[in-house]
Image: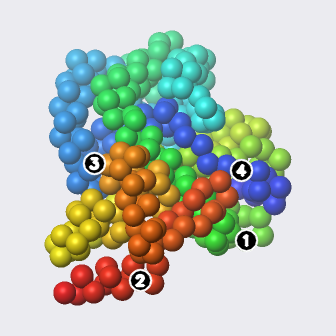
Amino acid sequence: MGLWYVNADTLAGSRFVLSPLAEVFASLKLLHTGAASHPGERAWLDAHLPAYRRRLAADPLTALLIRSGLGTEWIADFLTPTPRDGESFEEGVARVRAAPPAEARAHLTVSLRGPLPAALDDRDDLPERAADLLAYVWTETVRPYWDRRRRILEADVVARTAQLTRGGWAAAVDTLRPGRTRWLGGNRLQVNLHEYPPREISGAELVFVPVTPQTGWVSWEEPDRYAVIYPCAGVLAQGPRTAVPASLGALLGPARAGVLVLLDSPMSTSQLVAVTGQGLGSVGRHLKVLLDARLVERRRAGRSVLYSRTAAGEVLVTAQQRG
């Protein structure tokens, strides 16, 4: 398994960050496979996969480059520069474009686990081609949804931070990519299931980066920066929502009832905005009414305020669901 050795200070100093470039690369991976893991991904693929495939059909060299770079066990490193906090997509993709051509070709041999195809050998424009394709994916398939996706990612970070507060790093890490990412104790962080030599990363910067497509990977800039990219929870990642009982909707109003039903586990205002699709003002008004009625309560977790159902709210929802 892939192991990183992380001391207590490095783990304590780690943080969650958002990365438009990571979101775009995850979306590229989803377009490459064409296989949806839930209805949200299926709808997105139906909207964008035909045009993506037409683009690659018109540019077989770039198509070969991407097939070569997305190996079964390893991704060509130059395609996934380690995310940086606050970096725009344009800044991130510039790092892909600036990759030395010889280095890019070397990375491709690792992802292929063998020599480069003749069409890619000795070409110096591979980073440029990869960056152009990432720019296409951003412009055509991610940027139109970025505001909503960003809210989902922010909500995930809030939830992970609350989980960290309640259960420590073991609880937070174990749920990032279940079965793949685990805190093993003894300063050992399992990051994947591949059999590669362990890495000592104590003293480096460690970041955890959510993406909405259900995929993940790791990246690094030795010896200073390491990242675990993981699939977030949220609208694009969740299973079917719990239905709002019609009687509860008639009592409270459908939108307000929907908020109450969602609060079977603590959520922040930003999470509720992301999950419900309602505006911030509407969610705030619903929460105020529910607080005044003592159907929900709030508590602070770090910098976030989390809302959850009270015992009275639980009784009300449960009774309506059973009825």
Query: Disc 1 marks which residue?
Result: 185
**What secondary structure is marked by label 2?**
helix
Please report the residue visible at 35 percent of the width from the left and 45 percent of the height from the top: 279
- In space, the residues marked 4 and 2 are separated at their CA atoms by 38 Å
The reply to whether discs 1 and 4 touch (Cβ–Cβ < 8 Å) is no
- In space, the residues marked 1 and 4 are separated at their CA atoms by 17 Å
> Considering only order in the chain, which callout, 2 or 4, is on the residue closer to the N terminus?
4
Where residue 263 sits: x, y (%)? 41, 69
Query: Disc 2 marks which residue?
Result: 312
Q: Quadrant location of the N terminus?
A: bottom right
Q: Nearer the viewer, mark 1 or mark 4?
A: 4
Q: Nearer the viewer, residue 217 or 244?
A: 244
- Disc 3 residue type? Glu
Query: Disc 3 marks which residue?
Result: 41
The reply to whether discs 4 and 2 touch (Cβ–Cβ < 8 Å) is no
Query: Disc 4 marks which residue?
Result: 14
Q: Residues within 10 Å of mark 2 (few under 14, many from 20)?
A: few
> Considering only order in the chain, which callout, 3 or 4, is on the residue closer to the N terminus?
4
The reply to whether discs 4 and 3 touch (Cβ–Cβ < 8 Å) is no
- Disc 2 residue type? Ala
- Disc 1 residue type? Gly
Vertical arrangement, residue 306 with respect to residue 63, above or below: below
> Considering only order in the chain, which callout, 2 or 3, is on the residue closer to the N terminus?
3
